[in-house]
Image: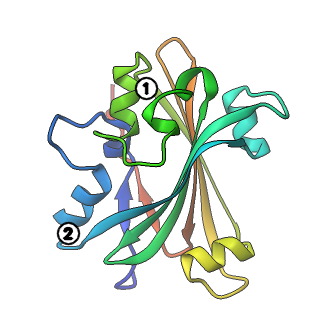
Amino acid sequence: MPDDAWIGEAAPYLTPREPGQGDAWTAEAASRGRRGGQRLLYAGEAEAPEAVRVALGIATGERAVVRRRLILLDGRPVELADSYYPLAVASGTPLAEPRKVRGGAVTLLEELGYAGAEAVEDVSAGLADAEECALLELAPGSAVLRLLRLTRTAGGTPVEAALMVMPAGRHLTYRLPVP
């Protein structure tokens, strides 16, 4: 595996943080002696891409709250992460505001009564578009991984659809409890 490859786990990003804890990405990077960070590019209402609309059950033309972030490792971009929330869940909350969310989105969703109980992830590969190449500092025509993670409550209500774009050298590791 190349020196710049990164193996990450999804579980910490789906678990609410304890009071005073930093975000999961910063903690994961620090545990490896690296510096994780993120830059908020946009927060507010927007139209969602079709895959996100379908996942969240949003009608064509209906808007959602989106938080678009550029994820950084040692100051370099490694992922573009767009988290979409139904208006009924996120409108009027800190999720719709262009600032850091104390404790992170998963923690806030739990406080609002939308604790995630199930996450379904769909991973695909493709070529980065021009905007993704610019933000992720990739050469035109670079391959990327696309991960769509849908989080639902125990009652089945979809509360977040996160669309992540990563350079193809990224690895995802899953640990599942055996019943």
Residue underneath mark 2: 32
Callout count: 2
Q: Position of residue 97 (x, y in %)?
A: 48, 41
Residue drawn 73% across and 76% down? 130
Q: Earlier in the sequence, mark 2 or mark 1?
A: 2
Does 47 sit above or below residue 159?
below
Q: In the figure, residue 113 lies in which quadrant?
A: top left
Residue at 34% from the left image edge and 85% from the top image edge = 3
Q: Mark 1: which amino acid?
A: Gly
The quarter of the displayed image where residue 36 is located: bottom left
Compared to residue 30, the image places residue 97 above or below, namely above
Q: Is residue 128 visible?
A: no
> In percent of the image, x 71 and y 86: which residue is there?
140
Q: Amino acid at mark 2?
A: Arg
Residue 34, image quadrant: bottom left
Q: Residues within 10 Å of mark 1 (few under 14, many from 20)?
A: many
Q: Is residue 27 visible?
A: yes
- Where does label 1 land, which residue? 116
Give coordinates of residue 38: x percent, y percent: 39, 62
> Which element type, helix, strand or loop, lies under badge 1?
loop
Q: Secondary structure at mark 2?
A: loop
* Residue found at the far top of this picture: 155
- For the point 78% across and 31% down, the residue is 62
- Mark 2 near mark 1, Cβ–Cβ under 8 Å? no
Viewer-side residue, 118 vs 77: 77
